Structures are given as structure tokens and as C-alpha cells.
Image: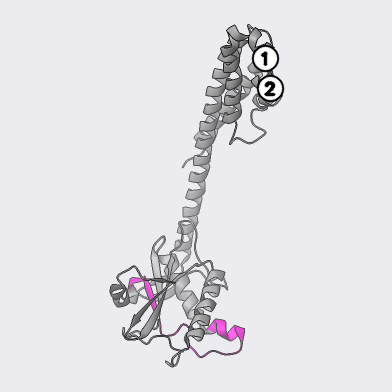
Amino acid sequence: MAEFELDVATLLRTEEHSGRVERKLSLMGSRKATDSRGEERRRIKTILEAAVAMGNSLPGESVYLIFGQRDDGTIAGEVDPDGYSLTPEQAKSARDRLTDLLMQVGIAVSWHSRSENSRRVWIAQFIGRRRGFWYTTADGAILVRSGGRTYPADPNTVAGWVAERLEMTSRSRHDAAIDRLHLLQEVGEAIAAFEDATAAAALDAPLGPPSSWTVMDRVALAPVEKRWLDYWSALRGVDRSLVGLVDTVLPTSRQLVREQRPPLTAKDLLPAATAELRQALELAHADINRINP
């Protein structure tokens, strides 16, 4: 639990019709506790319904359940539904139980406390729904808040939330398609550099990756070593550019990297690699054109 960083006095004066706060006398709900788990759920049903309704009505904003404050604004502190004081253990147990029940409907709360005249008020803070999503009660009710009261959401409201989700899905697909295009363009730059390096290095005798070179290899190829180093560096560039793309994309480029071919034989695969890349770029552009973000 953290001490409040808000203007608590202002929060405690906030009217419920703002839709931002809901006051409850007790952490234990509106009626006395019973031994029945089902009765316990019904006893705090109004708390859960208020939380769902506020969360649905203020998307992305902080909303608050205030416990220990009467509707007239006076502070009662940690009390049971009849106004009798709770022990610290009872208050903690009630908070833990509320936290669990709220989590069951997808609401994660952070608890804050404030003492006034030796009476402690507890405030559960959480964030309203994300666009395209909404909270429901344990029995599936979709609720909203209006004028400090809780109501079932009308079909048009829910349809609007569904439209938000469809819009978000479209944007997500569009962003993914753009990312894929950028990755393919990076591969294109790497392949172009590799083609140039291959053309230069293919004039020399075949030689494997630098890690396999012997001293005699380095002596023999000293005049052309830079071209060979550039070739293997360019091939590593192709390898790095393929990171982020699924394994089934650009199989010939992956074959070049996997087989570590020297320039003379790598030249044989380059036409197929560039053709695959061109086709992948065309498909990526077509995907973007089909998606309306």
C-alpha cells in the first residue's frame, strides 16, 4: 500500500455523479458477513458492479472505490456494515478478499490509505477499460455508470466498443505489415551489398570463412584479402537482416547463410535470392494496400 499522491481532500469531496468515485461505508460490503461464500459474493455485489460500471465509463482514466466514508462525506474509518470498528486483521482480510474478487473480473487495484482524526479511509484505484475492451461482472453483465448510478450497457454502446476493437485490429495488422516491409527492405540492402562483394571476390580463388584461414592462406591472398573480408562481412549482413522474419521467408537467402558458400558458388544462388526478395516485397506492398488502418 502506498500513501496517496493525489489531492486527497479534493478526491474525498468529489461527487459520485462524476462517475469517478464510489463510496462504501465498509470494506465488507453493504450487509453483515455470513458463513456462505455465495452470500459473501452477494454482500459485496454492489461494489463489484460499481467497479465494472466505472471502469467501462471512463476508458484509460483512474477511478476510485472509497471505503470508510459515508455518503454525506463524514469519515467512518475501518468499520463493518453496521458501523462497528474492524480490527486491523479484519480490515486486511476484507481488502484481500476484495482484491481477489476484483481480479476475477479483470480489475487490478492498487490500495491507498489516509487517516483523518484517527479514522482510516481506504481507496482502491484502478484504470478504466482499454479501447476495444470492457469489463463484465462474474455473471456476464456489462455495466456503465451515469449520474452516479449503475446501468446495463445498451446495445449501441457495446457495438461502439466492438467497433473500437475492429479498428485496433486493423491498425495492428497495418503496423505489422509496415514492419515486415521495412525488414524486407533491410534484406534488400544487405543482398545488394552482398552482390557487389560477391562480384569483386569471385575474381579470386575460392576461400572459406576467415575463421578457417591458415597463415599460408593469408600470405597467398594478402593482395586481395580486403575483397574477401568484405565478402564474408556482407554475408553476415544478410544473416543479420533476416532476423525478425519467419523462417519460411526467403529460403535461398537463408541457404546462402547456412551453407557459407564462397563467392564463385554463391553467384549461382543470387538470382533466385533476388527473385524471392522481389516477390516478397511485392506481396508486402499488396498487403499494406489491402489493409485500411
Label drawn at residue 215: 1
x and y percentages locating residue 138 in the rendered image = 57, 73
x and y percentages locating residue 10 in the rendered image = 28, 73
What separation in Å lies between label 1 and label 2 (alpha carbons)? 21 Å
Q: Residues within 10 Å of mark 1 (few under 14, many from 20)?
A: few
Residue closest to the eye, 161 or 18:
18
Q: Earlier in the sequence, mark 1 or mark 2?
A: 1
Q: Is residue 158 visible?
A: yes
The region drawn magenta spans 18-42
Q: Residues within 10 Å of mark 2 (few under 14, many from 20)?
A: some
Residue labelled with disc 2: 260
Residue closest to the eye, 261 or 57:
261
Dot 2 falls on a residue whose secondary structure is loop
Q: Is residue 152 visible?
A: no
Question: Dividing the picture into quarters, in which one does residue 151 lie?
Answer: bottom left
Question: Looking at the picture, which amino acid does disc 2 mark?
Answer: Gln
Dot 1 falls on a residue whose secondary structure is helix
Was residue 217 drawn as part of the magenta stretch in this picture?
no
Question: Looking at the picture, which amino acid does disc 1 mark?
Answer: Val
x and y percentages locating residue 8 in the rendered image = 31, 73
Taking 240 as reference, is 9 above or below it?
A: below
Taking 89 as reference, is 199 above or below it?
A: above
Residue at position x 54%, y 78% from top?
97
Was residue 41 drawn as part of the magenta stretch in this picture?
yes
x and y percentages locating residue 75 in the rendered image = 34, 85
Residue closest to the eye, 248 or 58:
248
Q: Residue furthest front?
A: 215
Taking 278 as reference, is 50 above or below it?
A: below
